[in-house]
């Protein structure tokens, strides 16, 4: 109960920041809102803690499931659904892939009961209430929509290709650096010299 409240109120802070960014993107329109949830202490009651939040009236829709996958195509295509997925991508990008808001659900643009998954160590002192594996699933399954584009977010697939290309470059550079580091200079020169005389040797034969 404590964790759920903490996760929802943390997600609320992220969506407030998202709202500010979305305001500057022309044609973005209304931004989803995560409603506040309060923990109430009632010492005289058998169950001393309870949560309190606004009652949402209307069609309750799950825009994403707990593991970060969009629940179905029809819901994903709604404006609220697309904006929720773009929000997930925006937070994921902002936290460098360390935090994901999951369980995006509610009535229209009002959301509640959301969850958060973080990397194993947590993110900036915060640990999510959902499994870390949700982050990997989101990375593999998220498809960008027009709201991701409006916010200038890069496709996760393209981003991962660029990242692995960069990693290969670094590995290759390190590999050369290690070769040069480990081979004593004299032996390195001898190897180069033997390479240079190799053609002459074959000509003599
Ligand atoms: Zn996206």
Image (tube, rainbow, N blue to C red):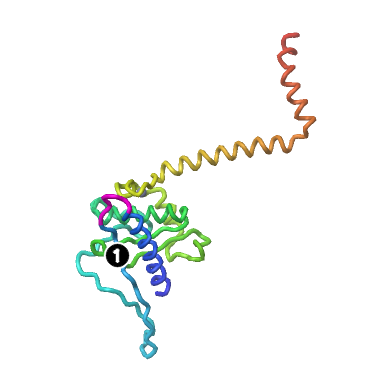
| Residue at 73% over, 38% down | 182
Q: Secondary structure at mark 1?
A: strand
Q: Mark 1 = which residue?
A: 111
Side of 171 relative to 205 (left or right) = left
Q: Is residue 19 one of those drawn in magenta?
A: no
What stretch of residues is rendered in magenta? Answer: 24-29
| Residue at 75% over, 26% down | 191
Helix, strand or loop: magenta stretch: loop
Where residue 53 appears, as percent x and y from the top left, is 30, 74
Where residue 150 appears, as percent x and y from the top left, is 32, 47
Q: Quadrant of residue 8?
A: bottom left
Q: Is residue 189 above or below residue 53?
A: above
Side of 14 relative to 30 (left or right) = right
Side of 84 relative to 134 (left or right) = left
Residues 34 and 77: in front is 34
Where residue 33 appears, as percent x and y from the top left, is 30, 63
Quarter placement of the N terminus: bottom left
| Crowding at mark 1 (Cα within 10 Å: few <14, some 14-19, many 20+) | many
| Residue at 27% over, 55% down | 81
| Residue at 42% over, 63% down | 130
Residues 178 and 35: in front is 35
Q: Quadrant of residue 197?
A: top right
Where residue 112 appears, as percent x and y from the top left, is 31, 67
Residue positioned most to the right: 186
Q: Is residue 14 above or below residue 42?
A: above
Quarter placement of the C terminus: top right
Side of 3 relative to 23 (left or right) = right
């Amino acid at each position: 109960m404590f964790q759920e409240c903490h996760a929802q109120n943390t997600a609320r802070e992220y969506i407030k920041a998202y709202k500010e960014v979305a305001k500057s993107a022309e044609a973005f329109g209304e931004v989803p809102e995560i409603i506040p949830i309060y923990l109430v202490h009632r010492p005289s009651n058998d169950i001393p803690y309870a949560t309190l939040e606004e009652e949402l009236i209307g069609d309750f829709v799950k825009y994403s499931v707990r593991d970060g996958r969009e629940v179905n195509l029809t819901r994903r295509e709604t404006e609220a659904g697309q904006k929720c997925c773009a929000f997930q991508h925006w937070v994921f990008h902002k936290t460098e892939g360390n935090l994901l808001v999951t369980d995006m659900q509610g009535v229209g643009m009002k959301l509640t009961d959301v969850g958060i998954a973080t990397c194993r160590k947590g993110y900036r002192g915060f640990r999510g209430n959902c499994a870390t594996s949700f982050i990997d699933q989101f990375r593999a399954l998220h498809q960008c929509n027009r709201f991701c584009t409006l916010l200038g977010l890069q496709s996760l697939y393209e981003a991962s290709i660029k990242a692995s290309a960069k990693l290969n470059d670094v590995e290759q550079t390190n590999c050369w650096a290690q070769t040069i580091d480990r081979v004593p200079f004299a032996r390195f020169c001898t190897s180069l010299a033997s390479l240079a005389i190799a053609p002459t040797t074959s000509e003599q034969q």
